Amino acid sequence: MHKTLVTGGAGFLGSHLCDRLVSLGEDVLCVDNYFTGRKRNVDHLSGKPNFELMRHDVTFPLYVEVDRIYNLACPASPVHYQYNPVQTTKTSVHGAINMLGLAKRTNARILQFSTSEVYGDPQIHPQTEDYWGNVNPIGPRSCYDEGKRCAETLFFDYHRQYRTDIKVVRIFNTYGPRMHPNDGRVVSNFIVQVLQGEDITIYGSGQQTRSFCYVDDLIDAIQLMMSGPDDLIGPVNLGNPGEFTMLELAEMVLKLAGGKSKLVFKPLPADDPKQRKPDISLARARLGWEPKVSLEDGLKETIAYFRKTLA
Ligand code: NAD
Ligand code: UDP
């Protein structure tokens, strides 16, 4: 049985990952500072003999004995990561150093939740892992993008310098139940707006594209990566290659949630990537993985969740 640490485990993705690991019988330690995560996301796990929750900020060292580490701690929504950008960079960089130090001492395998944001506003399409990206180092998104890029550097340097057993995945926009209603990301924003009868806020023309992966598909891939072959350290793109404009997404949410909301157009935030779509050939070939849940089916599940929680 693995002794597993999940940082950021009370957040959206972290709580789904904890569910999966607990159901597999792993001995799970979930740490979180509750900046964007919530205890209620993992409430249903408290009381299970193989689950433990600890308040901890990963910018401080952590001394525990584990053999697997999933490093998720970091706000992921632009609204939240720009709220305290210095803390965002510290979380990515000091957090990575602390968790890599822990992995080095305990000989644990450590998996980093990196992001498609390392590609910035990409000039190649779809994005492959060998693309170095187009990131503004001094803009409002840089605390997150450059923080995550530096974390990747640290992972690969720990691997080269100390042979630390690393895995790095680059996750493209993922959505599903347990996103925070005020998260600020587009899927939760549109659903909450429609369910509350508010206008749908389209930033810019709405012609920018994203690829949306349902959370269950992503957790499958994370598990395959963590248990995958030693030589597959990544980075590996994980996401759903379906590509949609924000206008198409808004129309789909309106149709599925049955609302009457109108579209209102707001300014496009600085450095907002124009298009994004993962090339997942590597994940297909090495992990035998590809997403199964269509955007329509995933949205239905997510709408049902918000309908219940907002009621
Ligand atoms: P989230 O905001 O719901 O989860 C982040 C969690 O980290 C929260 O529980 C938060 O409280 C915790 N946290 C933040 N700073 C911390 C600190 N200093 N110490 C301890 N805990 C801290 O976001 P999410 O969507 O679940 O994202 C989880 C991870 O996946 C992040 O690293 C994010 O960069 C990465 N990721 C997510 C997506 C996505 O679309 N959801 C895409 C790419 C990468
Ligand atoms: N977006 C939007 N309306 C919203 C929230 C976001 O049009 O209410 C747009 C945003 O400008 C971006 C896309 O949706 O082009 C995805 O934004 P999100 O914050 O979800 O993720 P990211 O930009 O990090 O991919």
Image: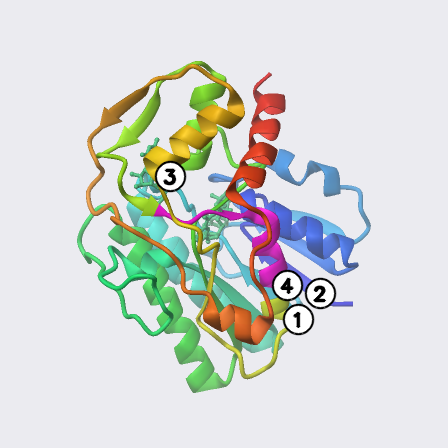
Which circle marks residue 163 in the picture?
none
Q: At 51% across and 42% down in the image, what residue appears?
A: 295
Label 3 belongs to which residue?
80
Q: At 33% across and 66% down in the image, what residue appears?
A: 150
Q: Main secondary structure of the magenta part?
A: helix
Mark 2 secondary-structure assignment: strand
Label 1 belongs to which residue?
67
Q: The residue under label 4 is which amino acid type?
A: Gln
Please report contact status of discs 2 and 3: CB closer than 8 Å, yes or no: no
Frontmost of labels 2 and 3 is 3
The answer for how far apart the CA atoms under marks 4 and 2 are is 15 Å
Q: Position of residue 132 (x, y in %)?
A: 28, 70
Circle 4 Cα neighbour tier, 10 Å, few/some/many (<14 / 14–19 / ≥20): some
The answer for how far apart the CA atoms under marks 3 and 4 are is 27 Å
Range shown magenta: 210-223
Label 2 belongs to which residue?
3
Q: The residue under label 1 is which amino acid type?
A: Asp
Q: The residue under label 3 is which amino acid type?
A: His
Circle 2 Cα neighbour tier, 10 Å, few/some/many (<14 / 14–19 / ≥20): some
Please report contact status of discs 2 and 1: CB closer than 8 Å, yes or no: yes
Q: Is residue 294 above or below residue 252?
A: below
